[in-house]
Image (cartoon, grey):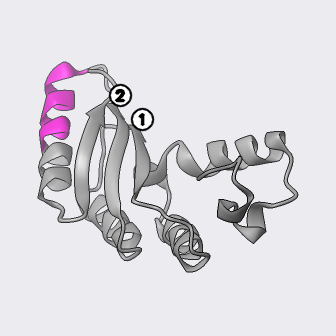
């Protein structure tokens, strides 16, 4: 979003203070593919597109704090967000686990799903 260009700031964001915007972004962005249903992100993306704001894609943070990752749920979330019609970039992909063998196995499963999803254009790892 172009915060400094008034014509590109959606009406529903106008009037919010910087701290309100940052708090909202932190709440909704930090664990997009690991905890949210994806419906809110899709709705926000469609709202931006409908307001005529040029959006190429969505960056989705993926911090997984459990070793029990449900791949069907992850695919559902990606599918739901992909309904926006925008390209998806997975950013800050992290898997937290004290067992490196299990962590590697989960990373393989997650990366396979992400790379095979037609809407995912790129993946940025945040560390191993």
Residue 101 covered by magenta stretch: yes
122 to 10, vertically: above or below: above
Residue 2 covered by magenta stretch: no
Comparing 18 with 125, the one in front is 18
> What is the secondary structure assignment of the residue under circle 2?
loop
Q: Secondary structure of the magenta portion, mostly?
A: helix
Which residue corresponds to mark 2?
96
The number of callouts visible is 2
- In which quadrant of the rendered view does residue 82 lie? bottom left
Seen in the image, is 7 located left or right of residue 71? right
Residue 96, position as x, y percentages in the image: 35, 28
> What is the secondary structure assignment of the residue under circle 1?
loop
Residue at image point 51% right, 68% down: 45
Comparing 37 with 92, the one in front is 92
Seen in the image, is 126 located left or right of residue 8? left
Comparing 51 with 44, the one in front is 51
Q: Which label number is shown at residue 50?
A: none
Q: Which residues are magenta?
A: 99-108
125 to 73, vertically: above or below: above
Residue at image point 25% right, 41% down: 123
Seen in the image, is 30 located left or right of residue 74? right
Disc on the earlier residue, 2 or 1: 1
Residue at image point 65% right, 62% down: 8
Which residue corresponds to mark 1?
65
Asked whether the residues under the numbered discs 2 and 1 touch, taking CB atoms below 8 Å apart as contact, a structural biologist would say yes
- Label 2 and label 1: CA atoms lie apart by 5 Å
Residue 16, position as x, y percentages in the image: 85, 54
Seen in the image, is 125 located left or right of residue 20? left
Residue 106, position as x, y percentages in the image: 19, 39
Residue at image point 55% right, 74% down: 43
75 to 108, vertically: above or below: below
């Amino acid at each position: 979003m172009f915060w400094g260009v008034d014509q590109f700031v959606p009406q529903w964001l106008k009037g919010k203070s910087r701290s309100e915007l940052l708090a909202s972004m932190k709440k909704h962005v930090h664990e997009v593919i690991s905890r949210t249903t994806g419906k809110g992100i899709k709705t926000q993306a469609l709202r931006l597109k409908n307001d005529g704001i040029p959006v190429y894609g969505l960056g989705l943070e993926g911090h997984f704090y459990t070793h029990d990752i449900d791949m069907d749920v992850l695919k559902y979330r990606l599918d739901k967000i992909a309904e926006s019609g925008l390209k998806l970039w997975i950013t800050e992909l992290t898997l937290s686990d004290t067992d490196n063998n299990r962590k590697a196995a989960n990373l393989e499963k997650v990366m396979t799903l992400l790379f095979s999803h037609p809407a995912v254009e790129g993946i940025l790892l945040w560390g191993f």
